[in-house]
């Protein structure tokens, strides 16, 4: 993969989208500093300059890549991050749809932006922020970093190379039948089988439930107190931590 390191940029996802027509598939835009990092649900992603990994991977699809498989990109990227962290002996889980948690603390966020075309997905920008050396997270009570987990310091550029090695190994699986990715993802789900509290955004109510798993189409299934499975698309439920 061809990595372009930038000292400072608003957002690596925004930069990847601006350069989309000009760069080949497999290009990685990485930044030492993001001045307007973007997160899920319109949130900002703020991290201390030089301390962490913030990068975006451009994938372009030849032939038809069905939209229904977009969710496989979630599986791929969160599994690659989980494997990366485990390579440092850090145990972690994937919080649906694609955050990575160590215990109750978030260590990584992923923002995937897909472009439609040719009857399916034409391309995708996979934006990944992994906290590496940062020790203090002001106003973010539940954040952690690799360094906080292991009490060591890391060379951020080497971390990116290690991550990309893992990502590249997993990448062919999104062009196979997806079962392998789905099974691996399902087995690493945060809070699976554990009773916990959730907020149902559409019904505007809190409830207790147990995550049963994820459907092949990416919906989360939570069994409520009545024993009924409630199915959620992204942004329809939130975890009460
Ligand atoms: C989340 O809200 O959890 C997703 C955060 C995604 C942050 C990464 S950092 C690199 C890339 N560029 C961005 O602007 N966002 C993503």
Image (spheres, grey):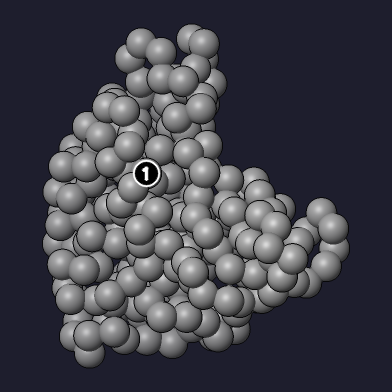
Which image quarter is the C terminus in? bottom right
Residue shown at 14%/62% (left/top)? 158
Residue shown at 65%/69% (left/top)? 209
Q: Please determine whether, in this image, residue 79 is positioned above or below residue 58.
A: below
Instruction: Look at the numbered disc 1 and give the secondary structure of its residue.
Output: helix
Q: Residue furthest front?
A: 227
Residue 186, x across and y down, in percent: 40, 54
Task: For residue 42, say whether it is visible.
Answer: no
Q: Please determine whether, in this image, residue 211 is positioned above or below residue 17.
A: below
Residue under label 1: 182
Residue 20, x across and y down, in percent: 42, 27
Residue 97, x across and y down, in percent: 51, 53
Residue shown at 24%/76% (left/top)? 90
Task: For residue 239, say whether it is visible.
Answer: yes
Q: Is residue 157 left or right of residue 20?
A: left
Which image quarter is the N terminus in? top left
Q: Is residue 83 left or right of residue 145?
A: left
Q: Nearer the viewer, residue 232 or 52?
A: 232
Q: Please determine whether, in this image, residue 5 is positioned above or below residue 118.
A: below
Q: Is residue 106 left or right of residue 4?
A: right
Q: Please determine whether, in this image, residue 2 is positioned above or below residue 238.
A: above
How would you rate the neighbour count of disc 1 (Cα within 10 Å): few for under 14, some for 14-19, many for 20 or more?
many
Q: Is residue 12 left or right of residue 158?
A: right
Q: Residue furthest right?
A: 204
**Figure label count:** 1
Q: Is mark 1 within 8 Å of ligand 1?
A: no
Residue 213, x across and y down, in percent: 50, 55
Q: Nearer the viewer, residue 62 or 3?
A: 62
Residue shown at 85%/63% (left/top)? 204
């Amino acid at each position: 993969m061809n990595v372009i390191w930038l000292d400072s940029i608003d957002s690596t996802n925004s930069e990847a989208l601006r350069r989309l027509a000009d760069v080949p598939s497999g290009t990685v835009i990485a930044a030492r500093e993001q001045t307007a990092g973007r997160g899920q649900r319109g949130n900002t992603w703020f991290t201390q300059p030089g301390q962490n990994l913030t990068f975006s991977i451009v994938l372009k699809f030849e032939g038809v890549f069905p939209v229904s498989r977009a969710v496989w990109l979630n599986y791929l990227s969160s599994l690659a991050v989980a494997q990366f962290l485990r390579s440092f002996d850090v145990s972690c889980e994937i919080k649906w749809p694609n955050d990575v948690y160590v215990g109750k603390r978030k260590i990584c966020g992923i923002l995937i932006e897909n472009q439609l075309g040719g009857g399916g997905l034409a391309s995708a920008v996979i934006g990944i922020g992994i906290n590496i050396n940062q020790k203090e997270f002001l106003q973010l009570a539940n954040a952690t970093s690799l360094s906080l987990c292991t009490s060591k310091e890391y060379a951020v550029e080497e971390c990116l190379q290690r991550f990309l090695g893992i990502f590249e190994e997993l990448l062919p699986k999104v062009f196979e039948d997806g079962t392998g990715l789905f099974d691996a993802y399902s087995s690493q789900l945060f809070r699976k089988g554990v009773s916990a509290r959730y907020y149902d955004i559409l019904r505007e109510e809190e409830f207790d439930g147990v995550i049963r798993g994820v459907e092949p189409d990416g919906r989360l299934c939570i069994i409520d107190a009545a024993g009924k499975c409630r199915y959620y698309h992204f942004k329809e439920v939130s975890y009460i931590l």
